[in-house]
Amino acid sequence: MKEIAPDKKTKKTVIFRTDGNSKIGMGHIYRCLSIADGLSKKGIMSLFMLSNYEMMDLIIRRGFSVINLNSDSDDMESEVYIAKSYVRDSNIPFLIIDSYSVTENYLAEMRQVCKVAYIDDVLAFPYKVDYLINYNLYADITDYERLYEGTDMPRLLLGSNYAPLREEFDDDLSRTVNEKVKDVLVSTGGADTLGVAVRFAEYLKSQNDKEYTYHFVVGGASPYYDELKKITDGTENIVIHKDVTEMRELMMSCDMALSASGSTLYELCACGVPAVTYVVADNQLRGAEIFNEKGLMISIGDIRGRDDICEKMYTALKDLGGDYPGRKEMTEKMQSLIDGRGAMRIAEFIEKVF
């Protein structure tokens, strides 16, 4: 691996501190990469600082360099002085942190050597940063006013206009809603920690229902690819897609979707794909709830510890597939919400405040 410090001739450099793996999924990595792509268009260099080499190849393939801290992603305190020294000695002026493991002390130490932005969706504590980004639908300034009561509040970038989607979603993605559903996308997240893909594939096979073709997306951090291939071998209406590079194209080719309640929901909105969603982590609860309340998607709720999830998913998809007016209305609402330019808006903001 090529580990480099910023080119001394480069005046503007942003460093991202984030991680992705089979435990926490890939959402943090992907949204940081989207912002880095936007920054590149502004002539701003991006580096990635990770706890280990696990996501190295992915990031290098996207054209960015990686600094390995050889630390524990769950214990950022253990790396704080190494990270601080690197940023200070390399004279990097701007740091973006995207990790649930960050601590108040970590933020305070890093702010001594550079400007700090934090990508938030859990409101865990008053983050002592310069800038805070929360692109979720439920992001509300009143929540942050309560969180920061009696203390200085950072500059806030709130709401779905800042959803940092991949560059491929920054386009005119107008959709024609087909009256008859043929293809269903199944996205269980980059890690799929509960093995939902395997369980749902087994259930579909047992139903012997050929009405829809199901397209399973398997992320690079998922350990279930071989098992899925074995289960679905010879099943014509179940297709496995591994490490998809053209996600927009696949989404646009499908009439509906089943998805975990992560950042994929915003990509589905950009493409206008009516969807059923479910929750596998605490940080997804509010998002699934508000998507459901606003009529953007159908949520079957928290599936942890439940035995009936496959039946619930299957029934919800069948109900949605049979509701052509409802799907058409859902598509209109989704595409009015997301235009795919969130990453570029963040990049433009960073360019101004450098």
Image: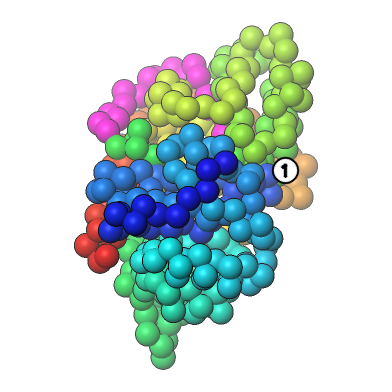
Taken as a whole, is the magenta stretch helix, strand or loop?
loop
Whether residue 45 is visible here, answered yes or no, is: yes
Please determine whether, in this image, residue 258 is positioned above or below residue 208: below
The answer to whether residue 201 is left or right of residue 327 is right
In the rendered image, residue 85, in percent from the top left (x then y), is placed at 52, 70
Please give the name of the residue rendered at 59% of the width and 53% of the height, measured from the top-left corner: 68
Please determine whether, in this image, residue 169 is positioned above or below residue 285: above
Q: Nearer the viewer, residue 157 or 307?
A: 157
Quarter of the picture holding the N terminus: top right
Please give the name of the residue rendered at 54% of the width and 66% of the height, measured from the top-left corner: 83
Q: Residue furthest front?
A: 8
Q: Nearer the viewer, residue 200 or 74?
A: 74
Please give the name of the residue rendered at 29% of the width and 30% of the height, measured from the top-left corner: 173
Q: Does 32 appear in magenta?
A: no
Tell me which segment is drawn in magenta. 171-187
In the rendered image, residue 160, in percent from the top left (x then y), is placed at 35, 53
Quarter of the picture holding the C terminus: bottom left
Q: Nearer the viewer, residue 64 or 213?
A: 64
Please determine whether, in this image, residue 333 is positioned above or below residue 241: below
Q: Residue under circle 1?
A: 194
Query: Which amino acid, by three-letter code, is at mark 1?
Result: Leu
- Residue 102 falls in image quadrant: bottom right
Q: Does 186 appear in magenta?
A: yes
In the rendered image, residue 143, in percent from the top left (x then y), is placed at 42, 74
Please give the name of the residue rendered at 31% of the width and 26% of the height, measured from the top-left corner: 175
